[in-house]
Amino acid sequence: MLPSMFPKFFNTNKWDIKREIFWNIWMLLSISSSALLVYSKILGEIDIQFSDVLKIILIASIPVALLITINHDRLLRSNLKSAQLLNKKLIEKKEQFQKLVHFESEYKNDEITLKPDAISVIKSADNYIEIYYERDGTLRKHIIRSTLNKAETATRECDFLIRCHRSYIVNIKRIKEIQGNSQGYKLYFDHIDFPAQVSQMYISEFKRHIE
């Protein structure tokens, strides 16, 4: 009930030792006061000694200790579950970057498998595609008989490899410079002697990935 009345105070993301101490003291005082009230109601108006107060506080500390243990266990289980989910997402993210991309060709001997983050640009060239990628610190070009649509399908799980033009797929992590023109944008890459184009129809999607 109290957490719903004071959501800011009981926010688990901001819960710290100060709030824990304050909460426990408040609980102890509340239970002790309630016990003292019941004690006086049952026995009538009596002279309550300091020793009686200590006894009541000691008795009240039992449920407080129990609640502390329950709360600690709840937070522990919650954090363990959260950590497991984060680890799972971290592993999935690492696996995503470790996956290889296989580009099929109409000619089997042209097929190639690459690390996605090594790819800079994929360019359509008539009935072929040119794949510009880095290996051993050197930019290389591989030509296969395929379409850019098939290349887009092969790279769909790599959110940093995006279609930006009917003739280009680019790795946004490898863009060196972006220049604007009347048709859209020009993208420049290290060791590639031509700019990739971003056409008007792809600008919104391109900006969403960059931003």
Image (spheres, rainbow, N blue to C red):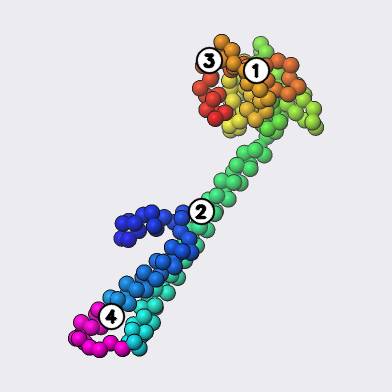
Splitting the image into 4 quarters, where does residue 207 fall? top right
Separation of marks 2 and 1 at Cα, in angstroms: 42 Å
Which residue occupies 28% across, 75% down?
A: 34
Residue type highlighted by circle 2: Ser
Residue wearing tag 3: 200
User: Callout 2: few (<14), some (14-19), or many (20+) C-alpha neighbours within 10 Å?
Assistant: few
Residue wearing tag 2: 82
Q: Are marks 4 and 3 in contact (CB under 8 Å)?
A: no
Separation of marks 4 and 3 at Cα, in angstroms: 76 Å
Secondary structure, mark 4, is helix
Asked if the stretch drawn in magenta spans residue 142, the answer is: no
State which region is magenta: 37-49
The spot of residue 58 in percent (x, y) is 38, 82
**Is any atom of residue 83 visible in this view?**
yes
Residue wearing tag 1: 196
Which residue occupies 68% across, 32% down?
A: 117
* Near-viewer residue (64 or 57): 57
**Lower sequence index among marks 2 and 3:** 2
**Lower sequence index among marks 2 and 1:** 2
**Lower sequence index among marks 4 and 2:** 4
